[in-house]
Image (tube, rainbow, N blue to C red):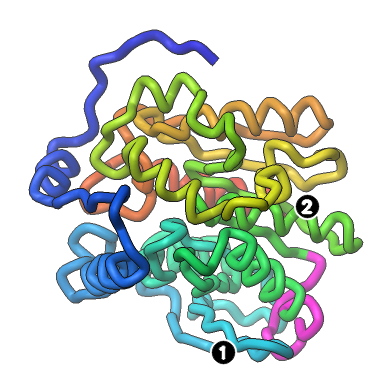
């Protein structure tokens, strides 16, 4: 997908903040280095001052941690509920945060609390395992899918309406969401919608061959080098990368209406565009919402990127429409 060159730049605040951040040396990063890097990054986004960047939660939603007990492991989830709803059964949005090898559900409090309050839905954000040298992308996919199945099976205790369920994900979380949607279709679970924000949907050998990667290799929030490291962790040697690449799924028919949110200053912008095209070809109703001057992960930085607010509003409107 060839796109013309541009001088478009992200907002000044984003450039300033990331100009003082030291990019790790991914080529020499050990397991211990990765663990330390992730710990520091997550401490930053969960600090009190972080809300100035990641946004203040909506006052019309409650936020609490809950444990999902599975047969072989326990997964923490962050649950957002609307304060003013009197309905006994609410729509459900299962959300998967981005980052892959870093990140936490807390960094998404702003968007998820707004969805809960404005859509009047329960949002469950999966605090999935983070990728490392021993934990591949497939493990994260299992966490997202297993949480979805668990809530479907125990809908009454969660207070949700199993006939009104959507999946949402950001970046690497979009890949988990998209693959969970495919698994749900194959398992006969009916979903109303999926929302994919700056999705990364290709971890095969073609993942870095898109024009957007060549055009934006050194953005403040995602670099080509960071992408290469992500791919090495995601698909260990000997693994078929197509099994965790929604773009290469054999059959994309029978999927729910989809909203793809694309920041234009993103190395993986073309991932979202190409996946939207493939979904349309398979007969899925797809809406694409592009946001100029916004970069990767912009929806988690509303304090720095004004475009996060219209993107949030588009997501809220889309979910309202699908849950009706």
Quadrant assignment for the C terminus? bottom right
Q: Residue 201's image quarter?
A: top right
Number of other residues with Cα within 10 Å of mark 1, as a class: few under 14, some 14 to 19, many 20 or more:
few
Q: Position of residue 234 (x, y in %)?
A: 54, 54
Q: Nearer the viewer, residue 126 or 311?
A: 126
Q: Residue visible at 72% across and 29% down? A: 278
Q: Earlier in the sequence, mark 2 or mark 1?
A: 1
Q: Is residue 158 magenta?
A: yes
Task: Tell whether 114 sits left or right of 86.
Answer: left
Number of other residues with Cα within 10 Å of mark 2, as a class: few under 14, some 14 to 19, many 20 or more:
many
Which secondary structure, mark 1? strand
Q: Position of residue 249 (x, y in %)?
A: 77, 41
Residue 272's label in the rendered image is none
Task: Tell whether 56 sits left or right of 96.
Answer: left
Q: Nearer the viewer, residue 217 or 10?
A: 217
Which secondary structure, mark 2? helix
Q: Is residue 251 above or below residue 76?
A: above
Q: Is residue 27 magenta?
A: no
- Residue bearing the label numbered 1: 67
Q: Is residue 43 above or below residue 199?
A: below
The answer to whether any part of residue 175 appears in the image is yes
Q: Residue visible at 71% across and 74% down? A: 146
- Residue bearing the label numbered 2: 182
Q: Is residue 120 above or below residue 250?
A: below
Task: Tell whether 107 sits left or right of 237.
Answer: left
The answer to whether any part of residue 178 appears in the image is no
Quadrant assignment for the N terminus? top right
Q: What is the span of residues highlighted in magenta in the rendered image?
A: 151-163
Q: Position of residue 194 (x, y in %)?
A: 66, 51
């Amino acid at each position: 997908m060839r796109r013309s060159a541009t001088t478009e730049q992200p907002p000044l605040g984003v450039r300033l903040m990331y100009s003082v951040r030291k990019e790790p040396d991914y080529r020499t990063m050990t397991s211990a280095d990765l663990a330390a890097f992730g710990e520091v990054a997550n401490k930053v986004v969960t600090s009190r001052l972080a809300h100035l960047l990641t946004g203040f939660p909506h006052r019309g939603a409650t936020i609490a941690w809950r444990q999902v007990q599975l047969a072989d492991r326990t997964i923490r989830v962050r649950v957002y509920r609307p304060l003013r709803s009197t309905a006994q059964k609410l729509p459900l949005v299962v959300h998967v945060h981005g980052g892959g090898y870093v990140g936490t559900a807390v960094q998404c409090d702003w968007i998820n609390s707004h969805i809960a309050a404005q859509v009047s839905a329960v949002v469950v954000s999966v605090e999935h395992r983070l990728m490392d040298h021993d934990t591949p992308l497939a493990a994260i996919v299992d966490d997202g899918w297993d949480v979805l199945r668990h809530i479907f099976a125990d809908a009454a205790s969660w207070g949700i309406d199993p006939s009104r369920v959507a999946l949402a994900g950001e970046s690497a979380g979009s890949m988990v969401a998209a693959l969970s949607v495919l698994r749900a279709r194959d398992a006969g679970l009916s979903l109303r919608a999926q929302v994919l924000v700056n999705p990364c949907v290709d971890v095969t050998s073609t993942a870095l061959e898109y024009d957007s990667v060549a055009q934006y290799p050194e953005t403040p929030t995602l670099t080509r080098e960071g992408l290469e490291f992500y791919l090495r962790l995601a698909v260990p040697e000997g693994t078929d990368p197509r099994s965790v690449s929604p773009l290469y799924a054999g059959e994309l028919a029978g999927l729910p209406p989809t909203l793809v949110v694309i920041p234009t200053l993103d190395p993986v912008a073309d991932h979202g565009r190409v996946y939207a095209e493939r979904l349309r070809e398979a007969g899925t109703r797809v809406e694409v919402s592009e946001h100029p001057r916004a970069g990767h992960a912009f929806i988690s930085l509303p304090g720095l990127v004004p475009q996060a607010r219209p993107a949030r509003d588009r997501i809220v409107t889309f979910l309202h429409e699908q849950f009706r």
